[in-house]
Amino acid sequence: MKIKKPSDLTAKVAELRAGLSGKTRLQVSLGTCGIAAGGSPIAAALRKHIAEQGLEKKFEVVDVGCLGLCYCEPMVEVKSAKGKSIIYGHVSEEQIPAIVAAGASKTAEGLEALKTSLYYPEEQAKPKKKVVQTRIALRNSGRINPEKLEDYLLQDGYQALAKVLSDMKPAQVCDELVESGLRGRGGGGFPTGKKWQFAAAQPKGQKYIICNADEGDPGAFMDRAVLEGDPHAVLEAMAIGGYAIGSDTGLIYIRAEYPLAIARLKKAIEQATAAGLLGKNIFGSGFDFNIELKYGAGAFVCGEETALIHSIEGKRGEPTFKPPFPAVRGLWGKPTIVNNVETLANIPAIFRQGAAWFKSIGTPGSPGSKVFALAGKISNVGLVEVPMGIKLRDIIFELGGGIANGREFKAVQTGGPSGGCLTAKNLDTAIDYESLKALGSMMGSGGMIIMDEDTCMVNIARFFLEFTVDESCGKCTPCRIGNKRLFEILDKICAGQGTPEMLDQLEELGNVIKDTSLCGLGQTSPNPVLSTLKNFPEEYKAHIFEHRCPAAVCTSLLNYTINENCIGCGICARNCPVNCISGLPKTRHHIDQSKCIKCGACMRSCKFAAIDRK
């Protein structure tokens, strides 16, 4: 059915609802994480079991995107037609008969259902639980088949676009977005509506809408989950933006390392175009809008909007001075809006529910919700979407399940490789743009890397700076040379070659790089160094003055010694790859420090706690 006007969309949705089978849905999480964990064989086994048992009239298996519970993949959600749901994690093929037999009416015997706190503010009153997620950008991820347009339509898909094209003028669209207070979720936090207004105010002619899907932060996978789980939401938002600024062309700049997201986007574009939801004369409004994909080669700097634009144009991915901003002079010299995936994923919900609804969530200065990717030393690795203003403590210890393996919390890095490391004293900080910036960190795109007591903060600063050095485009001297010098200083400190003067050099050079770099990558690159210097000065001093790594991570500063617990069994010597351990049977052995490569094989093999690491 070609949808030519809003009434056709209403009729199509009514037809789809009337045709719902009433079957219990067995939803298998098949985002990248679910597939990697073995979700595809689980889905195949479910279909086989249902066919063998003759249960096709009662159950249907649905491939969905990532629900965010990556730590417990492969995962199956059993959902009845009445909405009752049970989620099972770490599912094996042997458990499938029990899951199907239980249905959604009771928990399968021998399997514990996952306790989640997923809350969809469009659908229900907020529960009275202390800490809940607030799903707006992720509202459909893990709940619909991303490769079926019909599933998206049943979740009010393209209703926002129909409303905008039928009832609103372009200026009203921009004003509504300004009123909502939505800020860019890609890191900068600039008001999205104002950015749209700038482009709309430019003279009529060719303009562009670009979706920035070049997600490059280590440990970040928010945008990937949205594109894999709910691609039509991004397409709908881009069309709304195109109407608002007077553009008929959208481009999605996505890194080629996201093959599943690319495949699902391609299919979604084909489906939307075939249905008349993209292309010519959408909803009979006279508005035309088409979307195409452009692939990036994985350069981190191309996440910066001017570098991204240059990449699309076939040039080196290097940033340029602003102004002029892309909204005035962007792709091919034309007014261009660049929004990241998560920003766009919020927009259909805003126009369905209204600006006041969106502003009622979060804080006055940072309305709405934010998606975070929890990674590192945390129990529940995955995605959470929380209202702005929530405390770090609630994210890490409630939703994230606390620190893995019973270790102690030490630090959390927000904002990706250019963010700052925050400590336990910052755990009650409210998460919003200004609060994190005041602490020397940043919101960034939403990466959140948690560290435990076994993390060396000097080494972690060195790790992130090495990433920045590798990813610098090299255009400006402060970033190209300054960060290289910063890295060299950190490298010497971790190798036990640090001097007291280096502490002042790190701080002075870091501040110069922040003040003089061309783009946001360079301006924020010293954050890991400066924040760890501020929050963990004792670790730097231990490395420099005591030639000791308190976390026992920096191998050049480690020494393995054999203590009085040694019974001379010789296991350590037999496991040493460089034969640096000697001693007679039943006598205390000795490690030749000049030959030891600090691999730790001796300590791991010893059964008598006879080897110390200092």
Image (spheres, rainbow, N blue to C red):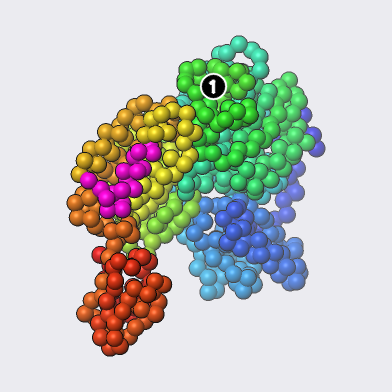
Where residue 505 sits, quadrant-wise, is top left
Residue at which label 1 appears: 326
Give the main secondary structure of the magenta stretch. Answer: helix
Q: Position of residue 547 (x, y in %)?
A: 23, 55
Per the image, is 46 magenta? Answer: no
Residue at the image position 57 percent from the left and 13 percent from the top = 202
Position of the N terminus by quadrant:
top right
Foreground residue, 385 or 340? Answer: 340
The amino acid type of the residue labelled 1 equals Pro
Q: Is residue 509 left or right of residue 313?
A: left
Residue that protrudes farthest toward the bottom in the picture: 586
Q: Give the range drawn in magenta.
A: 483-499
Q: Is residue 377 above or below residue 533?
A: below
The magenta stretch spans residue 486: yes
Task: Quadrant for residue 88, please give it.
Answer: bottom right
Name the spot of residue 65 as percent of width and height, x first. 61, 51
Numbered label tally: 1
The percent coordinates of residue 469 (x first, y second) are 43, 40
